[in-house]
Image (tube, coloured by chain):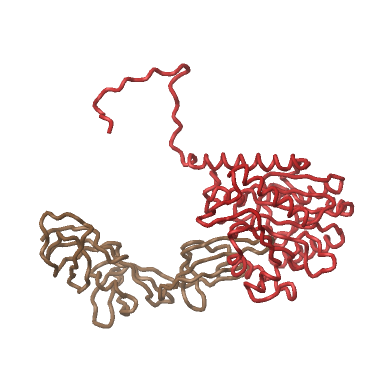
Chain colours: A brown, B red
């Protein structure tokens, strides 16, 4: 258990069996009253953010969390299979946990898998991945403006806005946290 | 653009060596705030001198800090750093002082946040033969005088919203505020845990921000060192000032009954011990002098927070250059 004075930004806590991470934290003591710890917390299972105020006397659950580096192996349609290279342990992660990140996964990509009570609850990809464009309108040669975009499709089917000079077959870098184009890394 | 290739004439070194440029420093942005703060301190001192108050200095290291339920003192060797100069200032009143004020550092262990720092500057003043109503009048005049002196106006803006220091200060009793914003009356039935919690979560966020707010007449159980209201003993003569929703000052008609004071200290000692918190020794000299204390009004005002509001800064971190 944590006591309220352990609370700080980034600490992971548990309430009613749900793990949360503290995204904002503020100490406050009214007048002659008791200390309060005003927190904004994010549900690690569904990403929802709520406000929660803890009192000095509250004791707060400590979640059983473990983060492991694993490599993406394959997607069997229902599950995403990851392997820990050192132990060859294989785990299956549900599509609801992977979510939109499925578009950026590639075979052998190293990701961080967060386990809660032994169950995978989130995966964290590298911040940037490189992907090849399979469909887009022909590029406008010499147009280096980056503020005008057109749609392009990755081999995973994901659609991303790219600058006009990008061509089919080009490889681009995408920010996995936003799903947005970052830069071109290779021309066809 | 300056052409880098053209040789600029080198200015002659001034007598006494070359001019020294201040080094780029993270402290530099704080200099205008320190200047404003200096003018606030001067305006405060000017107001008190003008109104016949004597500035006093009392010990910062105490053997026996006030035994309050939720205020923790920072140990300093075999003493403690003061959480407030209150007990010593009341002893001066008991000795016959009429109007005294003090500006100086106070310390509260473990308090750190947007509105808290473990070390801060407190303004306290006391009037003999007065009540919290007299202190409220002082406070209005002082705040208006300070705003005029440093801002040239009493119409302020804080974080994009107007804050009009004159002419109206909104007065709400704690019972009114709780009934309105939290749906229950802590004067009728006090619940310590719920009181503080709802104060922070429900009441304070809803207080008007465009004008100063006086939250007054606390439940007797939250009296701290204030006296019960004559004829209405279920409430204590205590008020708090809020500016833009930020708690600025806490005022009392002072408790002058040594028997009740000793009982409150004992109750706090018992509750602190039960919560595993340090229990400070009783200040027996204070309790002995309390018998000679005339009716008195007093107040503690957080100077850092007041400057923060006047300087339109969001947090104490923007105010205190050497914050840890």
Considering the image in quadrants, where does the N terminus of chain B appear? Answer: top left
Residue B153 on image: x %, y %: 59, 47
Q: Position of residue B68 (x, y in %)?
A: 73, 59
For image coordinates 81% across by 61% down, the residue present is B227
Furthest-front residue in this view: B167
Where residue A181 appears, as percent x and y from the top left, is: 24, 62
The quadrant where residue B149 appears:
top right
Let me know if residue B240 appears in the view. yes
Quick check: A163 left or right of B307? left
Height in image: B13 above or below A27? Answer: above
Residue B140 percent location from the top left of the image:
69, 52
Q: Quadrant of residue B11?
A: top left
Q: Is residue B83 visible?
A: no
Front residue of B33/B13: it is B33
Identify the residue at horizontal 21%, vertical 60% (top origin): A148
- In this orientation, which residue lies closer to the viewer: B87 or B1? B1
Quarter holding residue B133:
bottom right
Taking the view exactly as shown, the residue that stands out farthest to the right is B292
Q: How many marks?
A: 0
Is A147 left or right of B136, judged from the image as shown? left
Q: Residue at position x 48%, y 61% from top?
A: A9
Question: Closest to the observer: A4 or A52?
Answer: A52
């Amino acid at each position: 258990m944590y006591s309220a004075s352990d609370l700080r930004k980034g600490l992971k806590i548990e309430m009613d069996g749900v793990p949360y991470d503290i995204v904002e934290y503020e100490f406050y003591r009214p007048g002659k009253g008791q200390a309060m710890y005003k927190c904004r917390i994010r549900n690690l299972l569904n990403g929802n953010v709520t406000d929660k105020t803890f009192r000095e006397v509250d004791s707060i659950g400590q979640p059983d969390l473990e983060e492991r580096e694993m490599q993406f192996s394959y997607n069997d349609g229902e599950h995403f299979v990851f392997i820990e290279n050192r132990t060859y342990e294989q785990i299956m992660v549900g599509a609801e946990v992977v979510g939109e990140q499925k578009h950026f996964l590639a075979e052998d990509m190293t990701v961080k898998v967060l386990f809660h009570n032994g169950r995978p609850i989130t995966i964290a990809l590298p911040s940037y991945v490189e992907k090849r464009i399979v469909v887009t309108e022909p590029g406008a040669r010499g147009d280096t403006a980056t503020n005008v975009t057109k749609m392009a499709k990755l081999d995973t089917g994901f659609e991303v806005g790219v600058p006009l000079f990008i061509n089919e077959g080009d490889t681009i870098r995408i920010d996995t946290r936003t799903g947005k184009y970052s830069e071109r890394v290779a021309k066809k | 653009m300056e052409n880098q290739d053209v040789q600029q004439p080198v200015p002659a070194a001034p007598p006494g060596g070359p001019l020294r440029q201040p080094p780029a420093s993270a402290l530099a942005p704080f200099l205008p705030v320190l200047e404003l703060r200096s003018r606030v301190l001067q305006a405060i001192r000017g107001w008190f001198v003008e109104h016949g108050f004597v500035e006093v200095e009392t010990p910062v290291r105490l053997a026996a800090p006030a035994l309050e339920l939720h205020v923790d003192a920072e140990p300093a060797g075999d003493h403690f750093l003061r959480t407030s100069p209150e007990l010593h200032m009341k002893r001066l009143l008991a000795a016959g002082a009429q109007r005294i004020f003090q500006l100086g550092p106070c310390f509260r262990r473990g308090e750190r946040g947007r509105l808290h720092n473990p070390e801060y500057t407190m303004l306290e003043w006391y009037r003999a033969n007065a009540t919290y109503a007299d202190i409220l009048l002082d406070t209005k005049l002082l705040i208006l005088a300070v705003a005029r002196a440093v801002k040239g106006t009493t119409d302020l803006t804080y974080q994009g919203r107007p804050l009009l220091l004159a002419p109206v200060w909104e007065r709400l009793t704690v019972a009114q505020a709780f009934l309105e914003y939290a749906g229950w009356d802590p004067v009728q039935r006090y619940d310590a845990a719920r009181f503080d919690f709802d104060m922070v979560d429900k009441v304070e966020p809803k207080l008007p921000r465009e004008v100063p707010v006086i939250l007054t007449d606390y439940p007797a159980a939250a009296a701290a060192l204030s006296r019960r209201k004559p004829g209405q003993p279920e409430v204590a003569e205590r008020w708090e000032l809020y500016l833009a929703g930020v708690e600025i000052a806490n005022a009392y008609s002072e408790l002058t009954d040594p028997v009740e004071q000793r009982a409150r200290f004992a109750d706090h000692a018992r509750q602190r011990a039960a919560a595993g918190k340090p229990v400070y020794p009783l200040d027996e000299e204070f309790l002995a002098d309390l018998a000679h204390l005339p009716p008195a009004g007093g107040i503690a005002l957080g100077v850092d927070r007041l400057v923060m509001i006047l300087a339109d800064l969001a947090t104490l971190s923007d105010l205190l250059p050497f914050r840890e």
